[in-house]
Image (spheres, rainbow, N blue to C red):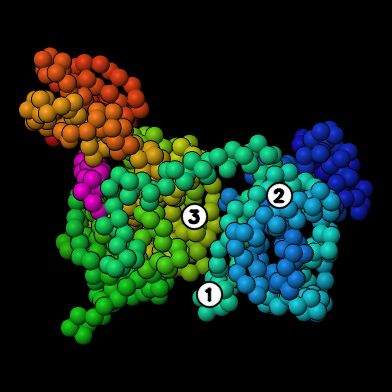
Amino acid sequence: MKVSIEGSVVEVESGASCRDVLKSALSGKKFKSVLAVKCGDAMLDLTATVPTACETLEPVYADSREGLGLVRHSAAHVMADAVQRLFPGVKVTIGPAIENGFYYDFDYERPFTADDLEAIEAEMDKIIKAAHPFERSVMSKDDAKKMFADMGETYKLELIDAVPDDIVSIYRCGDFVDLCRGPHIPDTGRINAVKLMSVAGAYWRGDEKNAMLSRVYGTAFPTPKELSSYLNRLEEAKKRDHRKLGTQLELFSFQEEGGTGMVYWHPKGALVRTILEDFERKQHLKRGYQIVQTPQILRRELWEKSGHYDNYRENMYFTEIDEQPYGVKPMNCVAHMLVYKSRSHSYRDLPVRLFELGVVHRHEKSGVLHGLLRVRQFTQDDAHIICTPDQLEGEIVGVLNFVRDIMKVFGFEYKMEVSTRPEKSIGSDADWDRATDALIKALEGQGLPYEINEGDGAFYGPKIDVKLRDCLGREWQCATVQCDFTLPERFDLVYIDQDGERHRPVMVHRVILGSVERFIGVLTEHYAGAFPTWLAPVQARLLTVTDAQNEFAEEARAQLMEQGIRVEVDTRNEKLGYKVREAQLEKIPYILVIGDKEVEARGVNVRLRKGENLGLKTLDEVVEVIKADCEEPFKSGGMSYSFS
């Protein structure tokens, strides 16, 4: 038979291995960097026999995304081997590759600690240098269960029972044997750069009723240079941690005595949030949205009707008032539909775009709470667009353009994913197909690239997830666009069309920033706390050299505030260098120094937070400089900044 390999057609003998076929078709240098091979959607080990129905073999290279996943998965096996060598009696469970590395969960007589990592890493190095091949075999479930039972690997027995097929695959690497679908890299010697990162506790299968295991995290890269670059980014990320900066800059805090997962906004943080929310309100009004405000709690029967009670109640809070059950809203869609239903609508009224900075509550497990990025109470810049089916694509495009314009202001690049129907969902297959097709059509119509994220849609409809990329290359999900034919049906939303008949509208659920708390957390780390001047809670600070300048400093503050500048005065009896350094640490964009010379000139000496000195300027000139700085980010999005 013949197969195509990177444009070349190769004759393949029956029973030939993928390794042999690729070796004959590729140059020696290219072949050395091949880790596995794809035939259609199936990825295979290089030792696998070329499938008889295969028309194309696609090499999986070490520097590809899939290749990196293979290296990390194989590194997890090497780590498990090392742990078994060092800690007799340890039981292994699962060890997948994840976004930034890999992990393996272990059951041992004591929890592993960070002190164990050095020894495990040293043992891994020995295994890697030995270049043990990864060897795949298959056996019946009964034989596999007997083998793992004899080894004392009780967790593997549970995993085997969950396999729907009668046959399971096993991988051997030296003396280490594991239940695994594969594929794997050819041998352990192909792992060029690996680092163990941390340890944590994890319940077996994520269920707190099960045993607590020790999870060891690690990462691996194709080259030591890439690993070093990643570790450097992690160190930079630690410096930018929004929780640390939130305290340092007096933006927010968490008060455990008041409850976990709830943010306490301090004056400066609340001001950042207010500026951001005011900006959002103005942008929504410019785009034809109507602002609404809806209650925090709704009758439980509404959540039953919407499907939230059956599909989302583990994330909700409930209470009782006058012997009536209520649910605290985790989303705003139900309330917005009630607003829409409060009066009749003609086709001329549509689309109706309802926007709310809505406070919602979602029950997150304590273990996943993380500063502003994962909280139990947060505010969404939530909107619901109710439109005719003919208007749907245009409304989705409008939201995508809105996202584009807003992300330009903050300097974020992003990618998009279409998340499809999850296993737990409501609505007909036909409605899900219509909704998914509408999202894809809107993206393709605008020439926007996207990936498919299978099974990660909302329970009521598919969605476009927007993944932002920050200055460290990390991805954050913020904006989403969801298409929903199901809830309008359940809540009997209608409009009167030109034919005088009642028709069913479509609803688009969407957020631009997503959770305001989360977005501020992302911004804080993206800017390392040095917010752009338009968003900074304090845009300028006046520093006096001696008490002799205090009177003019107060005059200057009043004049700058009159022009809409957010300004403070520091008249403390401290050395000027100390006050300048303090202002820089507080990330204040403009540091305005006043000495006798400046008082005489009725001006200030302007320094920037990064250390540049703009020299002596009049107060009017300072206002011009600050306003120009504020306006700069908005030019790319065709917007303007307001100082009112």
User: Spatial distance from mark 3 to mark 2, Cα to Cα?
Assistant: 27 Å
User: Left or right of 171: which side holds 543?
Assistant: left
Dominant SS of magenta comes to helix
- Three-letter amino acid code at the position of disc 2: Val
The residue indicated by pointer 3 is 419
Residue 513 location in percent, x, y?
34, 47
Magenta part of the chain: 265-289
Instruction: Please tell me whether residue 438 is drawn above or below residue 527 in the rendered image.
Output: below
Q: Nearer the viewer, residue 314 or 601?
A: 601
Q: Which mark is residue 71?
A: 2
Are the two marked residues, 1 and 3, in contact with CB atoms closer than 8 angstroms?
Answer: no
**Callout 1 crowding tier (Cα within 10 Å): few <14, some 14–19, many ≥20:** few
Closest to the camera, between mark 1 and mark 3, is 1
SS state under label 1? loop
The residue indicated by pointer 1 is 207
Q: Which residue is at 30% across, 38% downward?
A: 586
> Residue 150: which quarter of the image?
bottom right
User: Spatial distance from mark 1 to mark 3, Cα to Cα?
Assistant: 26 Å
| Quadrant holding the C terminus | top left
Residue 256 location in percent, x, y?
32, 65
Magenta span has 285? yes
